[in-house]
Amino acid sequence: MDVKAYIDGFLARYKPYKPYWNYEDGCVLIGCVHLFQATKDARYCDFVLDYLSQRVMPDGDIPTYERGQYNIDSINTGKTLFFALDQTGDERYRKAIEWHMERLRQHPRCQCGNYWHKSIYPNQIWLDGLYMAQPFVMAYEMRFGGMRKVADIVMQFQNVRKFLFDEAKGLCYHAYDEARVQPWANKQTGCSPNFWLRSMGWYLMALVDCMDGMNEQLFEHYKALEAIFREAIRGILRYQDPKTGLFYQVIDRADVAGNYLETSGSAMIAYALMKGERMGALLQGRYAALGAKAFDSLVSDKLYADKDGVVRLHDICLVAGLGPGEKRDGSVAYYLSEPRACDDSKGVGPFMMAYAQRLRMGE
C-alpha cells in the first residue's frame, strides 16, 4: 500500500473535525509538521499554515477557542504555533503561543498539582491530558519561559507514575479521581478500572515529546522522565501481539471476545518506540524495530480500500472516556462498545507521526 498516496488523499479531502479549536485537527496538523520535517515536502507545511492563518487573529486571539470549558485537550493544536512562527516569522503566532499559556495559567489544578482534565471532569487526571498540554509547556519553557516551569512538568508525570501506575501490570490506568467520588473510581486508589490503549499511547507520546524538547542543562529532569518512559515501554511491550506487533483496545485483555487490535493506540506506541530509540532514550538495536513492525502491520492490515474503492485507515476507536456521572463506567465492556471508525483524525494523525519516524529510521 502506498502510504504517501493515502496521506495525500486524506489531506486533500480533509474537513475540520469541529467548527471550533479542537485537538483532533491538532493531531493531523502535528502529523503534517512531522512529515514536513522528515521529507521537506512543502505541501505538509502549507496545510498547517493554511489552517492556522484562518483561525489565529493578528493579535493572537483565537475566536473559536472554547475558554469556559477549561478543556486541557484544547491546548494540543497550539503546539503547531511554534512551527508556524518558525516558518513565517509572523508575530501573530508568538502572541497566540502566549495566549495559550495564559489559558494554562488559569486552568484549575488538582491538589497534587496536575491540571484538571476539564471543568466537567473536576479533580481528575486523564493520561490523555499529559499529551495535550505538557509538550506545549515544554516547548514554551525552552524558548520563552526560561525553563522555570520544567520542574512542574516533571512533577505532573511523577504524579501519574505515583497515582495511576499499576506495578503488577506495568501499565497506567486511564484516569484518576483525586476526590474519589466518581462512579468509575476505585474508592481506595481513585483509579479507573481498566487499561485503555489510546490513553497509554497519549502518555508515551507525551513523555518522548517532552524529552525531545529538553537540552543538556536539564539533565536531571531528563533522566527522571527517561526512567518513567523506559518503565512504561517495558510494561506495554508485555502486551504486544507477537504476530502483528499491534496492541489491543483493552491492553491486557486479549482473552475477551470482541477485543481487537486497535489502530490509533498502536500507531502512538509505534511512534514512541521509533522516536525513543532514534533520540537515544531507548537502547539501540531493538525498540525501533518493534515500532517499525507495528507500523508496517498497520499498513498491511488496517490500510485498505473499501467497497467504494477509497483507501481508508480502519479500526480506530472513535472515542472513549469516563463519566461524567454514571456515563462511561470504564469497564471492559464499555471500551469494547464504543464504535470503530475509519480515517478518524485521532488515528490518522498518529499514523502520520509514526510514518515520519519510519522514514527517519537509521538517522
Image (spheres, helix red, strand yellow):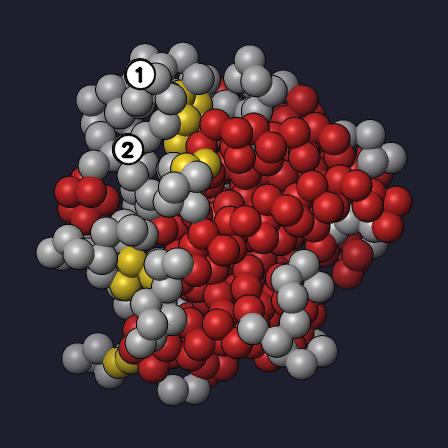
The picture quadrant where one finds residue 304 is bottom left
List the single residue furthest toward the left: 257
Please tell me which residue is depicted at 86% across the width and 50% down the height of the picture: 216
Please tell me which residue is depicted at 17% across the width and 56% down the height of the picture: 255
Quick one: SS at disc 1? loop
Q: Mark 1 points at which residue?
A: 187
In the image, 238 versus 270, the foreground residue is 238
Q: Name the residue under label 2.
A: 193
Q: What residue type is disc 1 on?
A: Lys
Q: What is the x, y in percent for residue 275?
A: 62, 65
Considering only order in the chain, which callout, 2 or 1, is on the residue closer to the N terminus?
A: 1
Residue 183 horizontal side relative to residue 189, left or right: left
In the image, 343 versus 266, the foreground residue is 266
Visible in this render: residue 308? yes
Say which quadrant the N terminus sits in: bottom left
In the image, 54 versus 266, the foreground residue is 266
Cα separation, mark 1 vs mark 2, equals 11 Å
Relative height, residue 205 to residue 188 (above, below) = below
Please tell me which residue is depicted at 36% across the width and 27% down the height of the picture: 191
Q: What is the x, y in percent for residue 53?
A: 64, 52
Q: What is the x, y in percent for residue 327?
A: 21, 27
Which numbered tag is attached to residue 103?
none
Visible in this render: residue 41? no
Q: What is the x, y in percent for residue 138?
A: 72, 41
Quick one: SS at disc 2? loop
Q: How crowded is mark 2: few (under 14 residues within 10 Å), some or many (20 or more)?
A: some
Say which quadrant the C terminus sits in: bottom right
Relative height, residue 247 to residue 65 (above, below) = below
